[in-house]
Amino acid sequence: MMSPQFITSRDNALLKELRKLAQDNTAYRKAGRYWVEGDHLCGAALIRGMRPDVAVYAESYWTHVPAQWIAATEKNVVIPDALFRDLSGLESPAKLGFVFNLAPPLEVQGAVSTVILDRVQDAGNVGSILRSAGAFGFKQILALKGTAALWSPKVLRAGMGAHFGLRLVEGLELDGLQALTVPLVITSSHQGALIQDLKIEGPCAWVMGHEGQGVSAPLMARASHFARIGQPGGEESLNVAAAAAICLHASSLSSACPL
């Protein structure tokens, strides 16, 4: 194991990059790597067999770092706690973070159970949907342009580690969905079968739309099925992340879009 690198200057080039990765939601696209902060997310990545390009620790935490974490990367960096607070995007900095290289863009797989995000803009909603997808066995996420950046710090935190078990494709135009061979299912408050009555043979793709505008008209026109979530309490609509959780859970338990 190599000795850690100690950095004490705020103007260090690596710290400048980390500050941007931690605080700018789209900086990872240009940098080609992304920042993961906190023991839960870092641990979730290691459990999936991922190896960070760089591990960064606050000085007060360095003596408490598990040996297997130190061995997981060839470059460990230790910085003063004040500098870690400065670069962190969290109100309560976690004292450790990993930098991972962004994987090359993936191709759309046509025949797998999928979740399509149509301009879902709130990072919390996107991360929550990814978490539900991972929990209920959906492995592919296709994010159309206008959707919150999937590898942004806020989406990563909301996803609670789900990212590391999913196949994520972002920045797609509508034509990018042509490779899908599974039927598209769209939730609607006024049309389609109740979700518990929906019957679909084989995998499908659930479409989750913009928080205010819903699913776009061109995508609606491509739908093979519409599903309705019963709301006996009389509310006008559900939050998109809540609706996604209901739909994906129903799919995992029934013959509607079996996995």
Image (cartoon, rainbow, N blue to C red):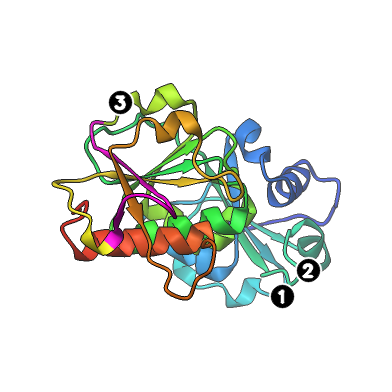
In front of the other: 108 or 252 = 252
Are dots 1 and 2 in contact, CB under 8 Å?
A: yes
Q: Is residue 154 above or below residue 168?
A: below
User: Alpha-carbon distance for marks 3 and 2?
Assistant: 48 Å
In front of the other: 49 or 216 = 216
Question: Which mark sits nearer the N-terminus, 1 or 2?
Answer: 1
**What is the crowding at mark 2: few (fewer than 14 residues within 10 Å), some, or many (at least 20)?**
some
Q: Which residues are magenta?
A: 181-195
- Residue beneath disc 1: 60
- Residue beneath disc 2: 81
The residue drawn where x is 35% and y is 59% is 247
Q: Indicate the quadrant where residue 167 lies.
A: top left
- Label 1: which secondary element: loop
Question: Which mark sits nearer the N-terminus, 1 or 3?
Answer: 1
Q: Is residue 176 above or below residue 242?
A: above
- x and y, in percent, of residue 198 in the image: 23, 55
Are dots 1 and 3 in contact, CB under 8 Å?
A: no
- Residue beneath disc 3: 179
79 in the magenta segment: no
- Label 3: which secondary element: helix
- x and y, in percent, of residue 38 in the image: 59, 67
Q: Indicate the quadrant where residue 57 lies.
A: bottom right
